[in-house]
Image: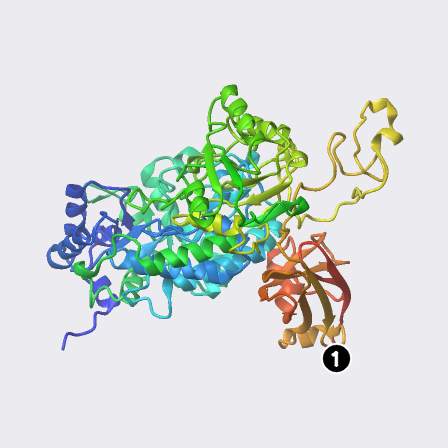
Amino acid sequence: MKAKVQPEQILASMTYAQKLAQLQIVWRPDSAEAGSLARNGAGALFWPASAQATNALQRIAVEESPHGVPLLIGLDVVHGQFTIFPTPLAQAASFDPEVARADARLSAKEARSNGVNWTFSPMIDVSRDPRWGRVVEGFGEDPYLNAVFGEAKIRGYQGDNLSSNASIAACAKHFVGYSAAEGGRDYNTTDISVQRLHNVYLEPFRAAVAARVASVMASFNAVSGVPMHANRELLTDVLKNEWGHDGIVVADADGVGELVNHGIAADTSDAGRLALSAGLDVEMGGSLLSDGEPIVREELLDSERLDDAVLRVLRLKQALGLFENPYVDESTAATDPDDASLSAARDTAARCAVLLKNDDGVLPVKPQGQRVLVVGPYADSKDHLGAWVQYFASPTTTSIAESLAEALPESVVTTLPGATFFGSDPGLQAEAAAAAAEADLVLVAVGEPSDLSGEASSRSSLDLPGDQEKLIHAIAGSGTPFAVALMTGRPLVVSDWIDQCPALLVAWHLGTEAGKAISDVLTGAVNPGGKLPMSFPRAVGQVPIYYNHESTGRPARTGGSLADKRPDVGLTGPNNTDDYYKSKYLDLELGPQFGFGYGLSYTSFELESSPDQALSVTLDELRAGSRISFTTIVRNTGTKDGDEVVQLYISDLLATVTRPVKQLRGFRRVFVPAGEERRVSLTIGWDDLGFWTNDHRAGYIVEPGEFRVGIGSGLTSREFSLWVTPSSH
């Protein structure tokens, strides 16, 4: 029987250069270079795009490298390998963590069958600025929602056993504060207070570590002037020592070398030294070795820190079962979706759609024979996969128009482009408007193409690109009832046309089965139940705008018109503020166009909520694990079966630091048949009622006082007062 490999024994036999080799993943080497790296004891490589090629590299590493250590094979499996699921932001709109877990589980199976054993996902950056293109890759503006969906993705990727042939190591990214980039411009400067860092941006990562995530990726930004790739306080003191993360910390691409650009490292050698000393374990890009020779001199690195990094890498390989079974069965490697994966992709995609407006019941499309015109650049397009999809991913199977024609056999479905994603052609709008006048219903399929969102895809404008807004106005002028289906990777500004639009369905980028899933929702085969995970602003000038903002000394509230109070300003439109000297814009109504947690249905619901116990608890009881329970009765008062999302929010009314006006601390999506009701119970406890101050050494605290607990949907809620009393001694 083969003796079990002990990482400590391997480490003891390694030279300094061999240790560094285990800590480096070279950015996209060609096949010849990859083979050479594997032969020289590289720790990790990127996937060479087939099971056969991966096995060949593993064979070189196991049979020809100095210690026979197998490779970590990494790849960005963000929302699918071959079968593409909705983008992560769309998944968050489902308010159903099972959507994220199902995606990750199937993605892990497809990826591992081809030799991938490590993904750089999930992204759990709290994203409050939709100008930032990477909002599509995360789970929105709320820390709690990011934590819950991040944990679901981690458990989906990693399963119950990392060594399973259906599991891969997950990577929580980007640690930390990357999404707070000034101006929403990718890779830009951030400036975050201590309390906001801990209460907002760190919280999803704390949950990821509690879920035993295998790796964490450092972010490109600096925190308090210290770039994260060299931030010992956060990488080592908080992540590893305080939270107990026993996995690896990996650099983002070229992030170590970029310490030179940040102005804190003299050269690449200095950058490597700073990063490893701060707590980084794996470097991505080439700042540790050059032609197999160390760039960082041995005497400049603490030997215990170096050995700790190598052991973390070796132990992850051990957990993945790579020492015992470094190869995959090439005959069973997935290369395309099967019926089961396509069915899962379609079901989850439909759960992500969010209905924001539906005046006069324009949707769902009536099944009786009618003339349906589908216009817009997304009418016949199959560009629904979204950002962060590899070139070998399976394409979208059918367009929206094709799927609608199949779903409406008694109707006549025709299509016209009407507009383009880029440029302007007034003739297209004129043609569409003329055709719309002869139709019974128009479906306007517009949005952002996939390549306008994702990394390095920040936008200064949040309007629909090209002449798509002109198309909506042209269709509105035809007088024919119409609905807009909006495909996007971020919240957009819709204020230019929303008042003229009877119905709006946000469909995001939904993946391989997007066309069919969108058709399912438009025709009512699926009743939309999603809610917004990010606020839709009224104008780009409001950004960043998010529901859980901190209280201010002069909050604006509805009441009155600014023009009445200050006629000298010259504004004639309503501003709905109660006083001039309040936090507001002179030229814009209060609040977002559509807020976090909002979403409609084709049916109607009534929610009746009540506490299950007395609303008073002591600090000692909370510390001991007591939780306060609330029950909501969800009644479907309409004629269609549907889903509602029960949401629980808390507000801390008096604290030693300014707290958010409210915070999501629980939610549950529940299916309720027409005319029936369901009971939903949600609880809150110690972890929900406290916060971090600006003195991190003080730790997490819960203060006595009154809390407001609101329970309901994105439309209505009921509020209760909860009293936390000092502990008796």
Q: Where residue 680 sits in the image (x, y, percent)?
A: 63, 70
State the colouring used for the structure image. Answer: rainbow
Locate the C terminus and report the quarter of the image it occupies. Answer: bottom right
Image quadrant of residue 568? Answer: top right
Q: Secondary structure at mark 1?
A: loop
Position of 692 relative to 672 (above/below)? above
At label 1, the amino acid type is His
Res. 304 visible in picture: no
Residue position for label 1: 729
Q: Where residue 89 sits in the image (x, y, percent)?
A: 50, 49
Res. 280 visible in picture: yes
Q: Where residue 304 sits in the image (x, y, percent)?
A: 33, 59
Position of 457 relative to 62 (above/below)? above
Locate the N terminus and report the quarter of the image it occupies. Answer: bottom left
Image quadrant of residue 570? Answer: top right
What residue is drawn where x is 51% and y is 34%?
185
